[in-house]
Amino acid sequence: MTLYKALLAQLFGLITAIGINPLLPIAYSGLESFLILQSSTAMLCSTLLHQRRWWLIIHILFLPSALTLHSLELSAHWYLLTLILLTLVFWGTIKGDVPLFLSSTAVVDSVSQFITKESAQHFAELGAGIGTITVPLAQQHPQLVINAWERAPLPWAINVWRSRHYANSRCYRGDLWNCDFNQYDVIFAFLSPAVMPELGAKLQTAMRPGSLLISSSFAIPDWEPETIKQVNDLAKTQLYCYRINY
């Protein structure tokens, strides 16, 4: 559905630009005006369709990037290679998942402190990407059993490669909803606002009582965090920490 919305926004922007641009004064009816009309309309349509904010960047850059690449007269093989690479990296984005975002070193340090405080034995990350959290944690906490879950093929493969020297860390590629959450003392997630209600409903009964859920950047609706950790990084990341009680 998200992909259809994106295509609809781009198409509506293109139709609008084709219809309005010829009506403008000659001095303002060039290619730049056409691109501004198309991208602005696509962004507006995307907003009205309630797409996520990062789609606005895609809409404003899509047509200018396409025209730039066309002017370079590259071989068709490069376009196919780029498409394959982007698909492998942003596997779930067209379904509304969050794109590949990398957690900062400061977030790693904060999560490490929580692990020490909780005396955790088993840790999991949902949406682990290339291992920016799990790899350094595996090095800092050699006795901690770490499971990483990542759906996109290329980040998963990179995570597996980076974790190869750490026997206490394992990266799974699959549906995180089928994970046995009851085995973990601490779970870290950096996902999307779209899935937080579903994640909360799942973990409320699937995690062990007394265990800790840490959600980076996105709160779970109607859940009261035990604490909110403000991380001193460029993104001013907030870690929402929830104690599981039921």
Image (spheres, helix red, strand yellow):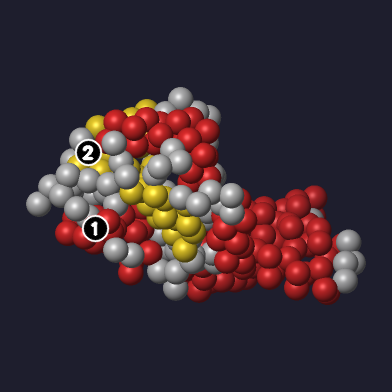
Query: Which numbered dot is residue 213?
Result: none
Q: In the image, what residue occupies the spot 19% across and 53% down?
A: 208
Quarter of the figure with residue 77: bottom right
**Label 1 Cα neighbours within 10 Å, binned few <14 / some 14-19 / many ≥20:** few
Q: Residue 51, located in which quarter of the rendered image?
A: bottom left
Residue at the spot of label 1: 182
Displayed quadrant of residue 242: top left
Residue 225's mark?
Answer: 2
Residue at 51% from the left image edge and 39% from the top image edge: 139
Kind of residue sitting beneath label 2: Pro
Pointer 2: residues within 10 angstroms few (<14), some, or many (20+)? some
At mark 1, the secondary structure is helix
Picture residue at 53% right of the left edge, 30% below the top: 234
Residue 223: where, in percent of width, then height? 19, 46
Provide the secondary structure element on which disc 2 rests: loop
**Looking at the image, which is closer to me, 52 or 185?**
185
Kindly tell me whether residue 192 is visible in this rendering.
no
Residue 179 point in image, percent of width and height:
33, 65
Query: Picture coordinates of residue 110 (x, y %)?
Result: 40, 31
Q: Is residue 18 above or below residue 51?
A: below
Mark closest to the chain's N terminus, 2 or 1 = 1
Kindly report the distance in space between the C-alpha atoms of the residues bearing marks 2 and 1. Answer: 20 Å
In the picture as drawn, the residue positioned furthest to the left comes out as 246
Which tag is nearer the camera, tag 2 or tag 1? 1
Residue at the top extreme of this rendering: 232
Q: Nearer the viewer, residue 104 or 87?
A: 104
In this picture, residue 24 sits left or right of residue 69: left
